[in-house]
Image: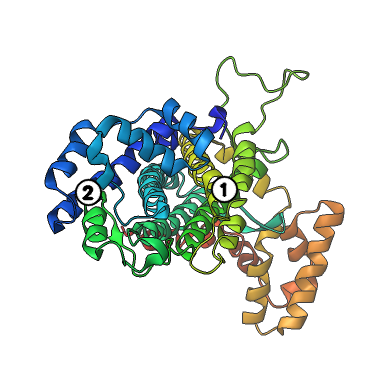
Amino acid sequence: MIPRYARPEMTTIWEPQSKFRIWFEIEAHACDAQAELGVIPKEAAKAVWDRGNFEIDRIDEIERETKHDVIAFLTNLQEYVGDEARFVHQGMTSSDVLDTCLSVQLVKATDILLDDLDKLLAALKKKAYAHKNDVCVGRSHGIHAEPVTFGLKMAQAHAEFARNRERLVNARKDIATCAISGAVGTFANIDPFVEEHVAKKLGLEPETISTQVIPRDRHAMYFATLGVIASSIERLAVEIRHLQRTEVLEVEEYFAPGQKGSSAMPHKRNPILTENLTGLARLVRMTTIPAMENVALWHERDISHSSVERGIAPDATITLDFAITRLTGVIDKLLVYPENMMDNMNKLGGLIHSQRVLLALTQAGVSREDSYVLVQRNAMRVWREGADFMDLLKNDEDVTAALSNEKIESVFDLEYHTKHVDTIFKRVFGE
């Protein structure tokens, strides 16, 4: 992932130094367990911890000859540990190291993502309560429908990301497994106790049953979860982009002093952050299909998944971390224009109250079919002529035969549409 869309806290997890340190800890903890079982001398296990080290450039040099990264690491480790290094990796296979390391990295990355989501949820809650009763028009198919509030829009996003957080917690649990089971996963050359010991030390759970790899359905679900979160980011980003259009301008990304919107047009204030988020969401979702295709490996293992995961694991987590953090900043600094919301709502001369007129007519004894015809024929005149909907209704004899002028006026009350906002907020925030 390019530095432009990366934060150091997340990228550190995927750097070679971090990866090889985890490899070392896996091997060293395994040696402790083997020593406890009496398989290797305790002095050898102690020597690994005392003298064990690695050098990235040296590992790369050895790998250019061996064409095997784990062997290159073990060879370099032996150069530091000495003769006792012959006891390292007893009964283990490369996947024991690689898969367990990936689990550790994904868990660390997930903890950052969970913290990111907590900050986003806090920003959404704050914005929801700040604009709880700011009425704006709801749209279906991009067309004015009925009134909502901007606070409800933010509350809806909060509920969605709260679900995403729960999904990510479950995905973390799913991915936090350790496999130290040896070739083809039978424990023939290594005791299951070693796996249990290493898992405990690394904050993982022993894999229920591995072949020679941790089953990739776990990884598929993990990356699918990241993809869903990315889709939620895009949904909210697209909403903000629509609401920032010049003809709408109900909200706007913060535009900093000195910021430039266009190299050609000095007047431009573009929604660049939410457009960027839309693109980043596509990158995260792009990782889900390869992760699912990794599930079907040959027999007990092949390495067709390996090259895929070396790319998608850092890319997806780094990009999503950046995207959530960027979205939090957008929400926190979002400029909201309640006056424009009200102006937009009044552009169609009261048409947003058409359903209430329809219901009032049916309550007054007019059939639903006839009521629909009466309301629609007046509504279409508003579309064509720019007339006032209430005036048209008051001058329609078929309408006034069923409804008094007072009754018609009463159904144009905006507060009718916001009477259950508190109930919805209690459902979302539990307060």
Residue 231: where, in percent of width, then height?
Answer: 58, 53
Type of amino acid at the residue the image marks with label 1: Ser
Left or right? Give the position of 264 relative to 144.
right
Numbered tag placed on residue 293 in the rendering: none
Residue 218, how many percent across, how many down?
Answer: 45, 62
Which residue is most to the right? 384
Image check: 36 left or right of 69?
Answer: left
Callout 1: SS: helix
Q: Nearer the viewer, residue 230 or 220?
A: 220
**Considering the numbered disc 2 on the image, is that residue within a helix, a strand or a loop?**
helix
In the figure, 36 relative to 257: above or below? Answer: below
Q: Residues within 10 Å of mark 1 (few under 14, many from 20)?
A: few
Residue 115, located in which quarter of the rendered image? Answer: top left
Q: Residue drawn at (71%, 54%), measured in percent from left and top? A: 142
* Along the line of sight, the residue nearer the viewer: 429 or 27: 27
Q: Which residue is mark 1?
A: 307
Q: Which residue is mark 2?
A: 31
